[in-house]
Amino acid sequence: MSSRTADIDFTFARELTVRTTVEALAATGWALEEPLWYMVNDDDMYDWKSATRDHTQDVLALLDAPEHVNHHAGVCVYHEQASTGGRLLFFPGRLACSFTPSIDRRRLPGSAGFTDLSWYMHTLVPPLLTVGLESYEARDIGH
């Protein structure tokens, strides 16, 4: 049995913050998942941690702290109305991030497991344009 992975890579014209990105995505129904999953890769371990929503401001401050700008940072977002979500991984320098639909991934109807990348792009690209989106590349790969 084969499996599939999908992701969308975004490149920005200017440095962005996790907070600004999450706030922009809220315009199309995205929000931080509860429990709030996050990660700062300052030790090459990519250890994801969880927190309750009442710690949202502390987690966003940690992810956006100046000492973490040159580390990978990540947060899980969820679209409640669509019942799907995934991981946003921010790259060092904060000029790029990647979205991986990893929570109840939407599939193309009638396909053999292909991800409905057009739905994700329709809900992710417009709000990211407001924070300097310059380009994107989407992939759905079978293994």
Image (cartoon, rainbow, N blue to C red):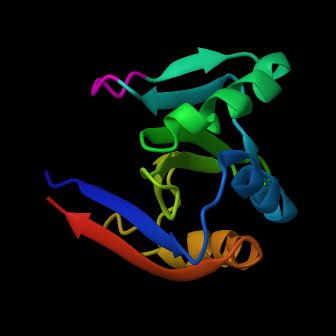
Task: Inspect the magenta stretch and tell me whether residue 6 lies in it.
Answer: no
In this rendering, position of residue 88 left or right of residue 131: left
Q: Main secondary structure of the magenta part?
A: loop
> Residue 131: horizontal and vertical position, in percent?
72, 70
Does residue 116 show up? Answer: no
Which of these two is toward me, 28 or 108?
28
Give above or below for 73 relative to 18. above
Q: Which residue sits furthest front? A: 66
> Residue 12: horizontal and vertical position, in percent?
56, 73
> Residue 79: horizontal and vertical position, in percent?
72, 51
Q: Which residue sits furthest bottom? A: 135
In this rendering, position of residue 18 left or right of residue 115: right
Q: How many badges with numbers are in the image?
A: 0
Q: Which residues are magenta?
A: 43-47
Q: The C terminus lies in which quarter of the figure?
A: bottom left
Give above or below for 67 relative to 9. above
Which of these two is toward me, 129 or 5?
129
Does residue 134 show up? Answer: yes
Q: Quadrant of residue 82?
A: bottom right
Give above or below for 105 relative to 69. below
Which of these two is toward me, 85 or 99?
99
Q: Kindly identify the residue that appears in the image at 78 percent across and 18 percent down.
A: 55
Q: Kindly identify the residue that appears in the image at 51 percent across and 64 percent down.
A: 95
Q: Kindly identify the residue that appears in the image at 69 percent across and 71 percent down.
A: 128
> Residue 51: horizontal and vertical position, in percent?
67, 16
Q: Kindly identify the residue that appears in the image at 54 percent across and 79 percent down.
A: 118
